[in-house]
Each structure stands twice: as C-alpha cells, then as structure tokens.
Amino acid sequence: MRSSPPSAPRKPRAEPVAFTRSELTRILGVYGYFVAAGDWRDYAIDCLSDAAVFSIFRRASEMPLYRIEKRPKLARKQGAFVVVSMSGAVLKRGHDLGQILRFFDRQKLKLAP
C-alpha cells in the first residue's frame, strides 16, 4: 500500500476586493449624471482578488470608456483609486475617491449647453 505524500498546508483564499456602499454611491452618482445626459449607457462591476473595477460603457458591446479601479495594495504609495481610459492610460490617481471623481467634472462642463 502506497502512502500519499504529506500535503502542503493550504493558504486561505483571499476575499475579493470590493467597493464599499458609500464608494459605490458616489460612483453611481457620477454615472447617473452621464446616463441622464445620454452619454453613457451601461456599466460593469468586477471584484477581483487584487482590485475592484467599475467599467463604464457607451454601448454594452464596446470596450469600456473609463474604468474606476480600487487597488488597496497601492493605498500607501500612489493612492488606492485610479481612473483609466479606454487606451489604458491613467487619467487620475489618488488616495480619495472624491478627488479622482472630480476628473469627470471637466466632462460635465463639455456636456453643458
């Protein structure tokens, strides 16, 4: 009878990163403004092991126009929050969600008649 080799201890599975209720409320407030203006139409939320991502789409079948990401590992260095464009360029980075959401204030001015 063969004995099985001792198994290595398993690492506990890390919980995925997610937005808090207050963070999601702030993001959806900005999103709602652009939906009402007819500029954005769809969104997706991904909770990954290292980041939470809110993707904003003009149409569901396209690439996201913007991604709002929360990366807790970067909180002490560059800031946990980042706005990324469709091309992958970092448009705004910071420690405070409100600070990076101000990036969209410039887009609001473009929509004003």
Image (cartoon, grey):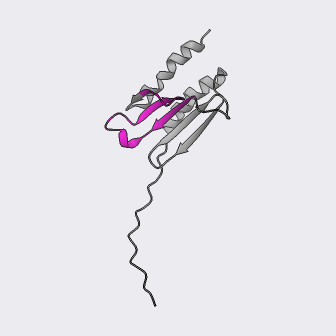
Residue 20 in sight in this render: no
Question: Quick one: which residue is furthest to the bottom in this view?
Answer: 1
Q: Is residue 108 magenta?
A: no
Q: Which residue: 52% across, 46% down?
A: 47
Highlighted range, magenta: 65-92
Q: Position of residue 82 (x, y in %)?
A: 44, 32
Out of 70 and 22, give the one closest to the viewer: 70
Q: Is residue 67 magenta?
A: yes
Report whether 26 appears left or right of 9: right
Report whether 12 appears left or right of 105: left
Out of 113 and 74, give the one closest to the viewer: 74
Q: Which residue: 46% across, 28% down?
A: 89
Q: Is residue 93 above or below residue 51?
A: above
The count of marks equals: 0
Q: Position of residue 113 (x, y in %)?
A: 62, 8
Question: Quick one: which residue is furthest to the left in this view?
Answer: 76
Question: Quick one: which residue is furthest to the top in this view?
Answer: 113
Q: Position of residue 98 (x, y in %)?
A: 44, 28
Q: Which residue: 67% across, 22% down?
A: 38
Q: Is residue 25 above or below residue 92?
A: below
Out of 21 and 77, give the one closest to the viewer: 77
**Occupied quadrant, residue 57:** top right
Report whether 2 appears left or right of 57: left
Residue 8 in sight in this render: yes
Q: Position of residue 71 (x, y in %)?
A: 42, 40
